[in-house]
Image (cartoon, rainbow, N blue to C red):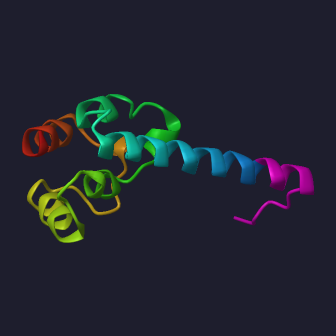
Amino acid sequence: MAIPQLSAEDRKAALEKAKAARTKRAEIREELKAGKLSLKEVLDMKDDPVIGRMKVSTLIETLPGYGEAKTAKIMDELKIAESRRLKGLGARQEAALLERLA
């Protein structure tokens, strides 16, 4: 599949859209870290196209006390692929994640 050739205006619009998505995901992570949002509330927002694209590993690492090693161990225990995004979590995986981290 060939890469589409975008006009300068289309490219600028796409860059702005991507920046807005990154900013929104960062705000959600900050609110989770500060305790303003719970993990359940974030998982309930996974139908939002921007939030649904957040990686599960990034979400776990955002939680206080969880780094890369703990996150990898939890994801392995729960059989969640490292590349899995929130939108792609199944009901069982989501329930197991909430049970393990809540």
Res. 34 image quadrant? top left
**Vertical placement of residue 31 versus 2, above or below:** above
Horizontal and vertical percent position of residue 38: 25, 33
Horizontal and vertical percent position of residue 14: 74, 50
Magenta region includes residue 4? yes
Horizontal and vertical percent position of residue 71: 20, 62
**Quadrant holding the C terminus:** top left
- Residue at x-position 73% and y-position 48%: 16
**Which residue is at the front of the view, 2 or 50?**
50
Which contiguous range is marked in magenta?
1-13
**Vertical placement of residue 78 versus 100, above or below:** below
- Residue at x-position 85% and y-position 61%: 5
Magenta region includes residue 89? no
**Which residue is at the front of the view, 73 or 89?**
73
Of all residues, the one furthest to the front in this rendering is 34
**Vertical placement of residue 95 versus 60, above or below:** above
Horizontal and vertical percent position of residue 1: 69, 64
In the displayed structure image, the side of residue 2 where residue 38 appears, left or right: left
In the displayed structure image, the side of residue 47 where residue 2 appears, left or right: right
Of all residues, the one furthest to the bottom in this rendering is 69
In the displayed structure image, the side of residue 13 where residue 27 appears, left or right: left
- Residue at x-position 11% and y-position 42%: 96
